[in-house]
Image: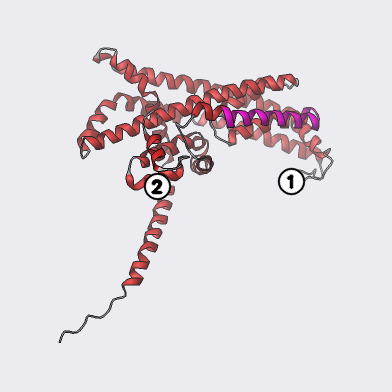
Amino acid sequence: MKSNPPATNAAPAAEASPLHHRLLFVIAAAALVWLLRETYAVLMPTAAALLLTLGVWPVVAAIRDHVPRALGWLGAVVGMLLVLGFLILFFAGIGYAARRIYGLAQDVGPQFQSRLGSLPFELPDIFSDGPDADTTALATSGDLASSALTVLNMTAGTLGGIILILFLMLLMLTEAGNWNAKIHSISKGHRDARRWLDIGLSVGGKFRAYFTTRLLVGVLSGLLYTGFLLLFGVEYAMLWGVLTILLSFIPTVGSIISGILPTIYVFVTRDIGTALIVGAGLLVIEQVMGNFIDPKLMGRRLAISPLVVLVALVFWSLLWGVAGALLAVPLTVLATVVMAHFDRFKPAALLLTDCDDLEGLEDYRQPD
C-alpha cells in the first residue's frame, strides 16, 4: 500500500512569490536611482548628446545624401554647429540675466526688506526684522546676490560638460551608419532592427517638436511679458522677457519663476496694488500660453501626462540638478517611447502618457 507523500505548504510559497517580486523591484529601483546619481558625469552628457543627435539627424541625413561620400562628415559638422549656435545664445542669455539680476540684488535688497516691514499684516519670523534692521536688509541683499553668483558659477562650471556633449554628439553623428549596421547584425531579425530605428525616429521627432514648441512659446511669452510690463513703465522689462524665454525650457516651475520675479520687483519699487495688477496680468498671459497656445502647437505629439511631467521634473532635478530639469521631459519621452514599443511595458507607457487606451498609445509611438 502506497503512502501518500507529506503535504507541502504550496499556498504560502505562492503567496510569497508576489511579495518577493515586489521586494526585488524596490531593490532594483533603488539601485537604478543610485546608479543614475553616481554616474551623472557619464550618463548626463551621453543622454544629452543622444537626444541632440536624434533631434538634428534629419538635417545631417539630408546633407549626407546630397554630397559626395567623401564629404559625408559635413552633415555631422553642420548638425553640431546648429546645436553649438543654440547653446551659445542660451548661455549668453543666462549670462546677461545673471549680471542684471546681480545688480538688482544689490540695488533693491534693502528696499525689499523695508517693504516687507511695511505690510499691513504680520509675516512669519523668517521675514521679520531682527534686532538690527540694517543687518537683516544686508543679509537679504546678500542672499539675492549669492543666488546670482551661483548662476554665474554654474554657467562657468558647465563649460566642460558642454564640450563633452558636443564631442559625443559629433562621434554619434559620424558613426551613425556603423551603429545602424551593428543593430541589424545583433538583432534577432529585421523586425527588431526596424523597431529600434522607429524608436530613434519617434524620439527624435518628439524632441524636435518639444524644443521648437518650447522655444516658440517662450519667445511669444517673453514678448507679451515685455510689452505688458512696458505699459506700466516697469524697468528691466527686457530682462524679464529674456528670463521668460530661458525659463520656458523648464516645465511648470520655469513659468512660475518668470512671473514671480517681475511681480516682486514691482512690489519693491512701486506699491502693492500695482504689483497685484502686474502679477494678475502675467498670470493671465501664462494661462493663455500654457492652456491654449502650447497645446495647439504641440498637439498630441508628446501626450505626456501633466502630473508625470511634474513628477519627472522633481525626480530628474533631484538627481541631476539644473541639467536634470532641462532634460526631464525629453528623458521621460525617451523612456515612454521605448516602453511603448514592447508589449510587456505598454501598460507602464500608457500610464505615463495622456492617452486613454492602447490604441492611442500605438498612434503616439509612431514616428512623426
Residue at label 1? Answer: 126
Answer whether labels 2 and 1 touch (C-beta < 8 Å): no
Residue ID at (24%, 36%): 191
Report crowding for label 1: few under 14, some 14 to 19, many 20 or more residues within 10 A (C-alpha).
few
Q: Position of residue 228 (x, y in %)?
A: 70, 22
Which residue type does callout 2 highlight?
A: Pro
Residue ID at (46%, 32%): 300
Q: CA distance from mark 2 to mark 1?
A: 46 Å
Taking the image as shown, residue 138 lies to the left or right of residue 171, namely: right
User: What secondary structure is marked by label 2?
Assistant: helix
Q: Position of residue 346 (x, y in %)?
A: 37, 45
Choose top left, top right, bottom left or bottom right for residue 268. top right
Which residue type does callout 1 highlight?
A: Ile
Per the rendering, the mark at residue 339 is none
Residue ID at (24%, 28%): 178
Report crowding for label 2: few under 14, some 14 to 19, many 20 or more residues within 10 A (C-alpha).
some
Q: Which residues are magenta?
A: 269-292
Residue at label 2? Answer: 347
Q: Position of residue 164 (x, y in %)?
A: 40, 29
Taking the image as shown, residue 323 lies to the left or right of residue 99, namely: left
